[in-house]
Amino acid sequence: MKAVAAVKQRPTIRHINSGTAIAGLLVLLAVIGCRSHVIKVNVVNSSTEKISNVIIDYPGATFGISSLAPGKTFQYAIKPNDAGPLKIQFANARGADHSSPGPTVHKNDEGSIEIRLTQDAAISEAKLLAPQ
């Protein structure tokens, strides 16, 4: 019977190209350092009838919802590029148009706004963090 000698393998050392390492580090720093400041808006139909033609106007843009069934919620993220109040418009089930001011938002604000629509009014609650 022959004795088998144990053979030790040397660990393999890989060299990373310095350009690749620097590029990877820059991408990592960009991902960590850059954060988008957005406000999550929830539009809730708290009535027992359909709401339609919902328009939410905020500094720099607008979004709309063609109709919102009773009890349903529509979610949207906004990124204001200036300071100013939201302007909320909608039509109730009878076709009557309503307009209501919303909370004031600022550039780089983040947080959430909940807009509860009834057949006659829009009630807003904002939980916003100011830019630092």
Image (cartoon, rainbow, N blue to C red):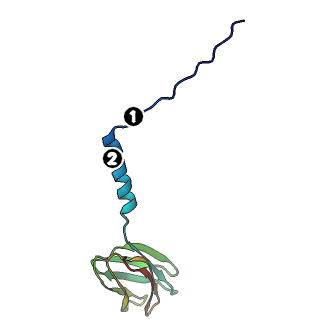
Q: Earlier in the sequence, mark 1 or mark 2?
A: 1
- Hey, which quadrant is residue 63 in on the image? bottom left
Residue in view at x 40 percent, y 82 percent: 52
Residue assigned mark 1: 15
- The spot of residue 6 in percent (x, y) is 63, 18
Badge 1 marks a residue whose secondary structure is loop
Work out which residue is located at the far top of the displayed protein and give it.
1
Residue in view at x 37 percent, y 86 percent: 90
- The spot of residue 97 in percent (x, y) is 35, 91
Residue closest to the eye, 107 or 50 = 107
Residue in view at x 28 percent, y 80 percent: 82
Work out which residue is located at the far right of the displayed protein and give it.
1
- Hey, which quadrant is residue 119 in on the image? bottom left
- The spot of residue 22 in percent (x, y) is 33, 46
Report the amino acid beneath label 1: His
- The spot of residue 1 in percent (x, y) is 72, 6
Height in image: 124 above or below 10? below
Residue assigned mark 2: 22
